[in-house]
Amino acid sequence: MNVKRLADLIERGELAGKRVFIRADLNVPQDDSGAITEDTRIRASVPAVRMALDAGAAVMVASHLGRPTEGEFKPADSLAPVAARMAELLGAPVPLVSNWVDGVAVQPGQVVMLENCRLNKGEKKNDEALARKMALLCDVFVHDAFGTAHRAEASTYGIAQYAPVACAGPLLSAEIDAITKALAHPKRPLVAIVAGSKVSTKLTILKALSDKVDGLIVGGGIANTFLLAMGLPIGHSLAEPDLVVEARAVIDAMKARGAEVPIPVDVVTAKKFAADAPATVKAVADVAADDLILDVGPKTAAILAAKLMAAGTIVWNGPVGVFEFEAFSHGTEAIARAVAASPAFSIAGGGDTLAAIAKYGIEKDVGYISTGGGAFLEVLEGKTLPALDILSKRAAG
């Protein structure tokens, strides 16, 4: 994908003295007192801010936080704690500016944070008048919030339409490069892991990937639906019997072009869904009517790990079992360890996947960890993300 990049503008000396509006993703978790409990997104946004400041720009940073009601400010919606944390990370003041749409006072070498952009009326509906006002604030718009790239809002899409220059920041650029490497120009074999509780939430992803990948590993409740599609027993495990036909179609589409959906040969079962439930390893054919399948078995885990070790590219979304319960975590751990050990380029995304990566401490062994959530899933579905689309159009025009 061809987009202008912040690094290229800086290299050409095009930022000195310019007003730069950075759309970051600073939507961090907070406790009941408003204290930030996890600051990964703030730390990830700092490089773009530093780059612009070092280049002599006057910098404005905008983000949403939570889901406020437009036009109705509440203290809990404020980015004040975020501005304070960014100031600590930058080692420089980061004043918070409210009611900023009609004008912002900021000098070259300074940075300000703009109060929660979702408080502005018309933000979510990408109101043209609001977007044009935002665009008037800057000489350069920098999109660096991949997590919002699937939404066409005033601060993600509209401003990119009307700003004099629109480009991708370092975080967004890295996402574009990783997605291109994994999906547009993958080293083969390309193996995707798509797991989760329901086929219905991932059906479009499964269908889209079935045309692209050489191996499609399914896990969790999704795998149970695929087991049903193969005529295998699942007891009273979580599944979607009404989607068996769709699951079978994915298997057949893969098989028709020499690709495969490896179906579990053994599973870990329990009689109830609980952390302390006794775990029993069974061949799939032996699953009883009152069993719950809560993980893949060791033979299946070994088969899947071998496929990942032989892969050229791995795309990972979702744990293959109830990894929050220790007795049913071994399948997901085996997958995680195999992804980490594989020579393949790997890209992983989604909240549960990131939690598994953190649990097993393999962050440094995954090729790229997407910050996107919903945006990452839409990329896997083969959708064009609005924010990337407008940046591409601006680069072409």
Image (cartoon, rainbow, N blue to C red):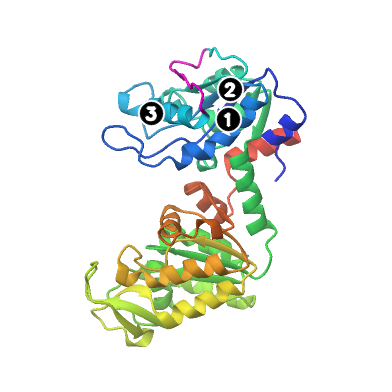
Which percent across, then down, holds residue 384? 60, 47
Give the labeled residue for mark 2: 59
| Amino acid type, residue under disc 3 in the picture | Pro
Left or right position of 378 against 221: right
Residue 11 makes an appearance in the image = yes
Q: Residues within 10 Å of mark 2 (few under 14, many from 20)?
A: many
| Amino acid type, residue under disc 2 in the picture | Val
Q: Residues within 10 Å of mark 1 (few under 14, many from 20)?
A: many
Q: Residues within 10 Å of mark 3 (few under 14, many from 20)?
A: some
Which percent across, then down, holds residue 114? 48, 22
Give the labeled residue for mark 3: 81
Q: Quadrant of the C terminus?
A: top right
In terms of secondary structure, where does tag 3 sit?
helix
Which of the marked residues, 2 or 1, is nearer the chain's N terminus? 1
Residue stretch rendered in magenta on the structure: 91-102
Give the labeled residue for mark 1: 49
Residue at the (39%, 79%) spot, across then down: 297
